[in-house]
Amino acid sequence: MRTLRSPVLSALAGAFLLYSPIPLPAQTSREPTDMERRFARHFPERPPVLFEFAEDADHRPLIVITNFHQFALTAYVVQTQPKSADDTAQTLIYDALTRMGGLVAPIPRGLSHKIGTSHNVGAPVPDAKLVAAVWEDGSTFGPDELLARISDTRKVMADSYDRAIAALQTGLDKNWTTEEYLTAAQQLQPPMPTRMMATIDEAGAASEKRIAQVMPGRTIADNMQHAVQHDRSPARVAHLAQILLKNFEQSRDALRKALGGRT
């Protein structure tokens, strides 16, 4: 029943441990200047990307997107249309700044990102098209509602990082134990939503925001539980909290900078 893993699950699975560095803008991309950000453009059609299909070694379908814009591609949105009754239409968001969909770093000019498409084995591969995109300089492509969906999730995650950063700084100031960091991480988790979503797209947007709210606290909990299993010394705990704090500040600042652009 399955080809490659679900994009929503891939945003969560394995995303919380810091033994893989938190993604930062690729070294091959150039940071846009304030002047270049001011002149960011909206592409009404024909964005500077190549969107195509391929197969992996097991003949499973892949979406391949290649960036041709001067600045790195930080997020894009794909919509799929089913060819069989067993499949459903999907709006899939890939965002390097929130790590949604498995996009773990911006795509510099001339480079590509490959991602598997979910569909039922034996059924026709759903049609897919690129419907929105955001670049590092603030340039955009796509309808306002999809661009707003990317921005809304980024803002939610930046706010979540703010709360996690404050908790980590308090822990460092007060020399917290592992248990105190775990308690604080639990308190950062928002309550589960109670309202049912009316549409698939509404449910998808709610899921993205939920991941953005949950991820910083889960990152603290997962790293504290994993890294101090064999060394619970105060020095080890404080060192890990400092690493988390620095990474959270970098990720938060990248989100805030992106939110200052056209999106």
Image (cartoon, helix red, strand yellow):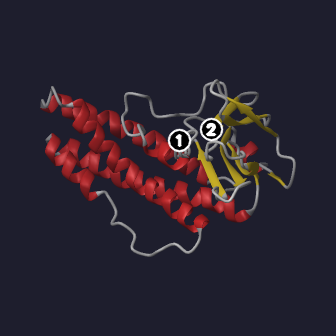
**SS at mark 2 in the image:** strand
Q: Nearer the viewer, residue 180 or 91?
A: 91
Q: Earlier in the sequence, mark 1 or mark 2?
A: 1
Marks 1 and 2 sit apart, C-alpha to C-alpha, by 7 Å
Type of amino acid under label 1: Arg
| Quarter the C terminus occupies | bottom right
Give the label on residue 182, or none. Answer: none
Q: Read off the residue under disc 2.
A: 116
Q: Nearer the viewer, residue 245 or 200?
A: 200
Left or right, 39 with reference to 9: right
**Who's the residue at 51% across and 34% down the image?**
23
Residue type at the position of mark 2:
Gly
Residue 244 lies, in percent from the top left, at 34, 38
Which residue in the protein does label 1 denote?
5
Visible residue check, residue 208: yes
Q: Which residue appears at 53% of the width and 41% of the height?
A: 5
- Mark 1 in CB contact with mark 2 (< 8 angstroms): yes
Residue 106 image position (x, y, % from top left): 62, 36
Give percent across and percent down for residue 254. Answer: 54, 43
Mark 1 crowdedness (10 Å alpha carbons): few <14, some 14-19, many ≥20: some
* Element under disc 1: loop
Quick one: label 2, few (<14), some, or many (20+) residues within 10 Å? some
What residue lies at 59% left-to-right and 71% top-to-bottom?
A: 199
Residue 14 on image: x %, y %: 41, 37
Q: Can residue 176 be seen? A: no
Report the front residue among 53 and 248. Answer: 53
* Quarter location, residue 27: top right
Q: Is residue 247 left or right of residue 187?
A: right
Number of labels in the image equals 2
State the quadrant of the N terminus: top right
